[in-house]
Image (tube, helix red, strand yellow):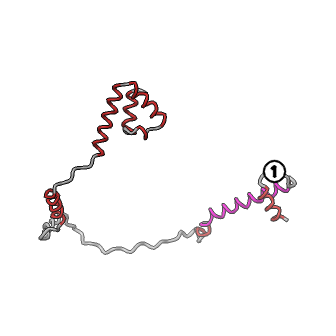
């Protein structure tokens, strides 16, 4: 491990070597025994993490009371309601009077469909059912022509034999 790698792993895992991966920890311990610059880097990291672990100093009672009062004053609603701004003048004047809303146009069928559009709505389901029936019939016919000795999918073939006989 190089000192640059040590610094990178120190940034990732921190100065507690027990939290490092085992292989990296052993290499870091060897490097700490041989390199003075690495020891300095490690000491700086330990000191920095020690500062981070220290609790924040408590606030003086007067300062704490002033902060709480300041926050609470900002939470109170204003004494008098805010006045509304005057309405903006209307800039666009229409030359045409407002028209009454129109009723939607009735939906008309094309005369040539004769209602056949309703017949073809279930078409995807019908096509899927026909494909499955064709598959089952084809497997059954394959079973019959092979004399029942096909080595694959015996459960399907047994079901088709019961169905055909």
Residue closest to the eye, 21 or 162: 21
User: Toward which corner of the image does residue 41 lie, by quadrant?
Assistant: top left
Residue in view at x 52 percent, y 70 percent: 109
Q: In this view, does 107 lie above or below 52?
A: below
Considering the image in quadrants, where does the N terminus appear? top left
- Left or right, 50 with respect to 152, comes to left
Q: Which residue is drawn at 59% across and 66% down?
A: 121
Q: How crowded is mark 1: few (under 14 residues within 10 Å), some or many (20 or more)?
A: few
Q: Please provide percent x and percent y for residue 31.
A: 41, 27
Q: Is 63 on the left or on the right of 38, as rendered?
A: left
Q: Name the residue under label 1.
A: 151
In this view, 80 is above or below 58: below
The answer to which of 58 and 163 lies nearer the viewer is 58
Q: Where, quadrant-wise, is the C terminus in this rendering? A: bottom right
Question: How far across and down, in percent of the image, does residue 86 sit?
Answer: 13, 67
Relative to 7, 82 lies left or right: left
- The residue depicted at 39 percent of the width and 29 percent of the height is 32
* Residue 137 forms part of the magenta stretch: yes
Q: Give the range drawn in magenta.
A: 121-144
**Residue at 45% over, 34% down:** 25
Magenta region, main secondary structure: helix
On the image, the x and y values in percent for residue 88 come to 15, 65
């Amino acid at each position: 491990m190089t000192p640059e790698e040590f610094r990178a792993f120190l940034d990732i895992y921190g100065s507690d070597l027990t939290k490092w991966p085992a292989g990296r920890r052993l290499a870091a311990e060897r490097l700490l025994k041989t390199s003075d610059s690495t020891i300095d880097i490690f000491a700086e990291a330990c000191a920095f993490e020690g500062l981070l672990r220290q609790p924040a100093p408590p606030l003086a009672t007067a300062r704490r009371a002033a902060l709480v009062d300041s926050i609470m004053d900002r939470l109170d609603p204003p004494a008098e309601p805010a006045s509304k701004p005057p309405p903006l003048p209307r800039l666009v004047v229409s030359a045409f009077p407002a028209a009454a809303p129109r009723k939607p146009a009735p939906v008309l069928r094309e005369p040539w469909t004769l209602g056949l559009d309703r017949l073809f709505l279930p078409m995807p389901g019908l096509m899927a059912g026909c494909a499955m029936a064709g598959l089952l019939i084809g497997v059954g016919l394959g079973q019959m022509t092979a004399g029942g000795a096909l080595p694959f999918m015996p459960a399907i073939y047994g079901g088709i034999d019961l169905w055909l006989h």
